Amino acid sequence: MNAVRPVDGIAFEAEADVLIIGAGAAGLVAALAAKEAGAEVVIVERDAVPSGSTALSAGLIPAAGTRFQRQAGIEDSPALFAQDILEKAHHEPDPAMVEHLVERIGPVLEWLADRHGLPFDVITNFSYPGHSARRMHGLPKRTGSELVDRLREAVEAQEIPILTGFRATTLFRAVDGLIAGIAGTRPDGGEERIGCKALVLACNGYGGNRALVARHIPRMADALWFGHSGNEGDAVLWGEQLGAELVDMSGHQGHGSVAQPHGILISWATIMEGGFQVNALGERFSDESQGYSEQAATVLRQPEGKAWTIFDARIAGIARQFEDFQNAEAQGAIVSADSIEGLAAKTGLPEAALAATAIEVAALKRGERQDRFGRDFSNVPPLAAPFHAVRVTGALFHTQGGLRVDDAARVLDKNGWAFPNLHACGGAAVGVSGAQASGYLSGNGLLTAVALGEIAGRVAAMASA
């Protein structure tokens, strides 16, 4: 499994100009770009239906200076977006790559809307941590599964074949360094080999590989894995054998708000609009507004690795635009009461402690004291009955470290040499979050999936000409 072998003596049953491994957002966007550039494209996907990490996300893509923002009266620019990314990531990512991606993502979203009919708009009723403007673009249901489905439909409309149930196992390399093709297994156990002129690795990260997580992110080794089961590090393992450079391997996106035991993502609007988190003692334990990624490890350090998010009906109304939140309500994950005392009774939290915490937060919102954790509550309204709560845990969503690529999405070796016809995008490529969970700016994953996916597909088509 995950082998790199010489191509000598290998016969391929099929050929493609551009071959793409993975049918999440990155792979599907790459396929659309490559086909538009004139290439014959084939996608292989290990699952029966395209999904990937994208399907488990909220499907929101950050972009700056788009017509969707202008239509909503939002002023923004790629330069401001790049500044936000670098500040959140402690200036660890390559600023030239950050600038390249933020300049590209807006036109790509408009291309997907105009050429392939994806009806993007901007979330305008709450802001995500670290973003200086409201720039999260999504589809009507606000789910990643909707994004994957619409991209898949666009790919099918372009008559691009998606070979599902195909687990890629081997890359074949020629003596000149070119990738000549791949081999993979089918559900019946048979092997199939496909040749290519250019290969795009869009097979995401390694969060589902416990051994790799323990090696690179040991503090998250026992965290709930909330990503796609197929994220087993295929690109990383192939890259190591090829001599590719791996960068920021400890970087990852966590999430401190996965409903338990229901396993449903709860929108961070529950925090950013004025909610707060308490542990089993009914006490706050952090500045929740710093970001949901770093909050994952913080929640996991609490008793039983759990917390309760406390919010109100106004905030629930905002969160309800997300289908996941609607599902959480339908499954009984959201607890409601007309008073904080009633909420304590329903959650099992200590009544006196929860009441004291609620009083403290109300005082912080009135500006009567400073938060001992450093959170600024000044721009959010007080909570009002009825109150809501949801029990959550921290989870690992996806990794941000990966293969270093150049601005053409070509994989680079440890000496900075680009593999001429090997590209990476999405979770297979290093992201723009640096080496720490706190470096993850909301939407960074889909930013690199979609922007690098378009670049990889377009340039791979040129390489195959």
Image (cartoon, rainbow, N blue to C red):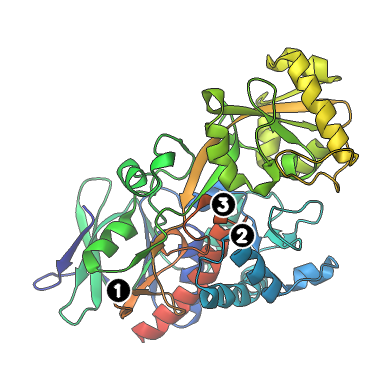
Residue 194 in sight here:
no
Name the foreground residue: 328 vs 361.
361
Using residue 56 as the reference point, say whether residue 318 is left or right of it. right
Q: Write down the quadrant of residue 19 in the picture.
A: bottom left
Of the 4 image quadrants, the one containing the C terminus is bottom left
Using residue 419 as the reference point, say whether residue 190 is left or right of it. left
Q: Are marks 3 and 2 in contact (CB under 8 Å)?
A: yes
At a point 72% along the width and 44% down the height, the residue shown is 374
Q: Which residue is mark 2?
A: 88
Q: Which residue is mark 1?
A: 413
Indicate whether 283 appears above or below 371. Answer: above
At a point 51% along the width and 75% down the height, the residue shown is 97
Q: Which mark is residue 169?
A: none
Q: Which residue is mark 3?
A: 438
What amino acid is labelled 2 in the image? Lys
Q: Position of residue 297 (x, y in %)?
A: 53, 39
What amino acid is labelled 1 in the image? Asp
Name the foreground residue: 219 vs 194.
219
Q: Position of residue 22 (x, y in %)?
A: 40, 59
